[in-house]
Amino acid sequence: MDWRFPARPAVAALGVMLCAGGAQAAMPVGGIDKADTLLLIVSSALVLFMTLPGLALFYGGLIRAKNFLSVLMHCFALAALASLLWFAGAYSLAFRGAGPWIGDLSAIGLSGLAPVRDGLTMPENVFALYQMTFAIITPALIVGAFPERVRFGWMMLFSALWILLVYVPVAHWIWGGGWLARLGVQDFAGGIVVHTTAGLSALVLAIMIGRRHGFPQSLIPPHSPAMTMIGAGMLWVGWFGFNGGSALVADATAGSALIATHLAACAAALAWAAVERIKIGKATSVGIVTGAVAGLATITPAAGWVSPAGAVAIGVAGSLVCFAAVLAVKHRWRVDDSLDVFAVHGVGGMLGSVLLAMFGCATLGGTGAANANGILPQLGVQAAAVALVALWSAVLTFVLAKAAALMVPMRVTAEQEHDGLDISHHGERAYEFD
């Protein structure tokens, strides 16, 4: 089980300590470690930076100019919405209480937080802040499935319901000591909790909302690949907080996570560019950054437990599989998952969550902490968890999307879509030319 989160049975915690070679035993007990605390403070800023402005610019550059502001609005508004929900009770439900399915409301309003988070070496308010940034970026990832065609009000209502009924329970199941954690499921930084939930939800929503006008008969080119590259660079840098901070300890595990994260992104970016050159005759800027993000998503669940060589292998595998998934979703299935949320984040996160059982083993250079059950049993546990969380996310997304649509229609009118959401929904333009 993932030793990073405190609510664990004593026997399981002992088993992981033995697999980790006693690294956890060196941690200070019952007091604040300033280095660990600073790691999470800095990492919180980096993960927030991934959404604001990283993801906003990455997504915004990939769509038409007349909808650029609408995507930025989605990301900014979701950051505010998720933060207030986290304050109001979502944090408590995810990370307080020992229930197998959901936590309790003992920290509602972020009140009564402990001076030191139980089982860790930092104040609980710092831990809560760090986890808040994950709750922000996860629903923001889904925005990439339906740009240019959904109502702002519906998006906000659906996202509020989704955070409370999809993200919070899954976070508790795996990271809060819930039933999947007790089965031994491992997820270092969010391959299941973040990328699987967001990816499957994005696919369902893309199917429900329908295609943009003109898709797939004609290409809908990005209005600013340069903006997308800038956003991707911000995501890459921010991912150091996403994966490195998830060690929750300023030690060799955090260092390993950072190295693995960077190498996986490098390998995936070049692998995507190479395949693109073979497939279409050119390596594109959008392609190389998409490959990097695929590698980052794939390494996320395993970052702190694999060797540098394992990280490179996972990055290449993630790039190749996600490239094939993009082609399948867009050209074979003809689903307008506009910015490839399912094919890159969903498929990458699921793939990495399964691969960690193999590349985390000591014989392949890993720490052994990722497969405390043994390679084959851990592989089965990981695959089952991925399947169950994917099913939960898909079913709940369908139900919540329909429920939100009873109050606010999902899709904009044909006229609003033609005019662009910047003007029709927000009364502004991203660019004014004389």
Image (cartoon, helix red, strand yellow):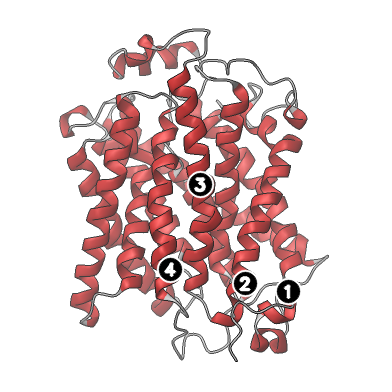
Q: Please tell me which residue lies in front, 35 or 323.
A: 35
Instruction: Name the amino acid, label 3.
Output: Val
Note whether 32 is above or below 267 in the view shown: above
Q: What is the total number of numbered labels drawn onto the structure image? A: 4
Q: Residue 317 sits in which quadrant?
A: bottom left
What residue did someone put label 4 on? 228
Q: Residue 194 — which label?
A: 3
Amino acid type indicated by mark 4:
Thr
Please, what is the three-letter code of the amino acid marked with disc 1? Answer: His
Q: Residue at x 41, y 46 (%)?
A: 239
Q: Is residue 412 left or right of residue 272?
A: right
**Residue placed under numbered mark 2 in the picture:** 69
The C terminus, quarter of image: bottom right
The disc, 1 or 4, on the residue closer to the chain's N-terminal end is 4
Q: Give how far apart the Cα atoms at labels 2 and 3 are.
A: 25 Å
Which comes before the other along the chain, label 2 or label 3? Answer: 2
Circles 1 and 2, Cβ within 8 Å, touching? The answer is: yes
Position of the N terminus by quadrant? top left
Q: Is residue 222 above or below residue 238?
A: below
Who's the residue at 47% across and 37% down the image?
43
The amino acid pointed to by label 2 is Leu
